[in-house]
Image (tube, rainbow, N blue to C red):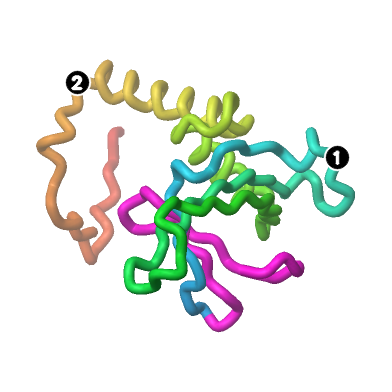
């Protein structure tokens, strides 16, 4: 990629080991292994002027493998270092990126929502355990609703 500002879409690969860089026509331009990201910082801490609350900055170090067919190329690996500014479409997407990078040990802290989600899941798990529900016995298909309402019950 050249050094001009360009717009790309960045997606996590299906195997969750690399980032797919797609151009505006959705063609894959590059694939970056996650271990190539040497540093991640937040737009707020880097004092980005435009949309700092949705911006992530990556320091990427790629090693290019020389072409074996071209004798003019050096046999040593060349490396490229560059900085990438990612702007999330929404705060929610930004928080998903933060949490994913935290889980990959690229960031020290998850988003604020991460702890809330973990707490909510823990509470649900405890409720299920205390209710003695066996989640292995859940029905495989939906239980149909009766077509007719039940008759009115008279308790008098």
Residue at figure coordinates x 58%, y 24% from the top left: 108
Q: Position of residue 51 (x, y in %)?
A: 81, 52
Is 31 located above or below residue 121 in the figure?
below
Q: Are marks 2 and 1 in contact (CB under 8 Å)?
A: no
Instruction: Tell me: 106 left or right of 49.
Output: left
Residue under label 2, please give it.
132
> SS at mark 2?
loop
Residue at figure coordinates x 49%, y 40% from the top left: 100
Is 130 located above or below residue 147 in the figure?
above
Q: Quadrant of residue 8?
A: bottom right
Q: CA distance from mark 2 to mark 1?
A: 51 Å
> SS at mark 1?
loop
Q: Quadrant of the N terminus?
A: bottom right
Q: Quadrant of the C terminus?
A: top left
How many other residues sit within 10 Å of disc 1, few (<14), some (14-19) or many (≥20)? few
**Label for residue 47?**
1
Task: Please identify the residue farthest to the right as the structure is shown.
Answer: 49
Residue at figure coordinates x 68%, y 37% from the top left: 41
Residue at figure coordinates x 13%, y 47% from the top left: 139
Q: Which residues are magenta?
A: 1-25
């Amino acid at each position: 990629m050249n050094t001009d500002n360009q717009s790309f879409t960045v997606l996590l690969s299906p195997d969750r080991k690399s980032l797919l860089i797609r151009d505006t026509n959705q063609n894959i331009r590059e694939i970056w292994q996650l271990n190539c990201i040497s540093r991640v910082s937040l737009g707020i801490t880097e004092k980005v002027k435009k949309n700092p609350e949705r911006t992530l900055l990556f320091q990427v170090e790629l090693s290019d493998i020389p072409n074996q067919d071209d004798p003019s190329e050096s046999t040593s690996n060349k490396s490229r270092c560059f900085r990438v500014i990612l702007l999330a479409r929404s705060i929610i997407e930004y928080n998903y990126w933060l949490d994913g990078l935290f889980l990959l040990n690229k960031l020290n802290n998850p988003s604020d929502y991460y702890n809330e989600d973990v707490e909510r899941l823990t509470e649900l798990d405890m409720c299920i355990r205390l209710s003695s529900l066996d989640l292995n016995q859940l029905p495989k298909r939906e239980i149909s609703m009766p077509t007719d309402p039940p008759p009115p019950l008279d308790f008098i």
